[in-house]
Amino acid sequence: MLGAPAVTPSVGLGSPNYPPSRSDTVARRCPLLRTLLAANLYRSTRVRRLRVLVACLPSDTRERALVPLKSDWLGDTRRIAGSLLRDLQVGNELTPAAAPDARGDEPSPS
């Protein structure tokens, strides 16, 4: 086939007739950037799903499950538990204190 045109294989995401776009080049040259973006997307997707699942629990169960995670040794776990506690308003209530005993020197109501 002496008269046949040479065929170049297509490599990457761009068309063989056009040079790759700038974003395509950056994405191929920065695997760390791609990895970080993928990890961030995965984490945010899982946190949204976890938020829906935790919201279905009764508030006392939610609190028992999330409060211990705020002191976990993994930073991601602490941040996720903290944001879920904030968003779902768990553990923000104050427990009312009992009335103090009378000392005897208080003025009496008239």
Image (tube, helix red, strand yellow):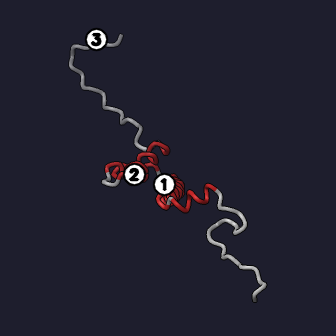
* Three-letter amino acid code of the residue under disc 1: Val
Q: Which part of the image, by quadrant, shows the N terminus?
A: bottom right
Is residue 53 shown to the viewer in this render? Answer: no
- Up/down of 2 relative to 98, above or below: below
Q: Cβ–Cβ below 8 Å for labels 3 and 2?
A: no
Where disc 1 sits, the SS reads helix
Task: Provide residue 14's location: percent of width, then percent of height.
Answer: 67, 65
- Judging by the rendered image, the residue that carries numbered circle 1 is 54
Seen in the image, is 83 located left or right of residue 11?
left
Where disc 2 sits, the SS reads helix
- Up/down of 79 relative to 25, above or below: above
Residue depicted at 26% across the width and 14% down the height: 106
Seen in the image, is 84 located left or right of residue 22?
left
- Which label belongs to residue 66? 2
Residue depicted at 68% across the width and 76% down the height: 8
Residue depicted at 49% across the width and 45% down the height: 88
- Asked which quadrant contains residue 9, the reply is bottom right
Q: Cβ–Cβ below 8 Å for labels 1 and 3?
A: no
| First reached walking from the N terminus: tag 1 or tag 3 | 1
Are there few (<14), some (14-19), or many (20+) residues within 10 Å of tag 2?
Answer: many
Of 11 and 45, nearer the camera is 11
Number of numbered markers: 3
Q: Which part of the image, by quadrant, shows the C terminus?
A: top left
- Which label belongs to residue 107? 3
Calculate the distance from the C-alpha at mark 2 to the C-alpha at mark 1: 9 Å
Where disc 3 sits, the SS reads loop
* Three-letter amino acid code of the residue under disc 2: Leu
Q: Cβ–Cβ below 8 Å for labels 2 and 1?
A: yes
Of 50 and 96, nearer the camera is 50
Task: Provide residue 74's location: percent of width, then percent of height.
Answer: 34, 54
Give the residue furthest to the front. 2
* Three-letter amino acid code of the residue under disc 3: Pro
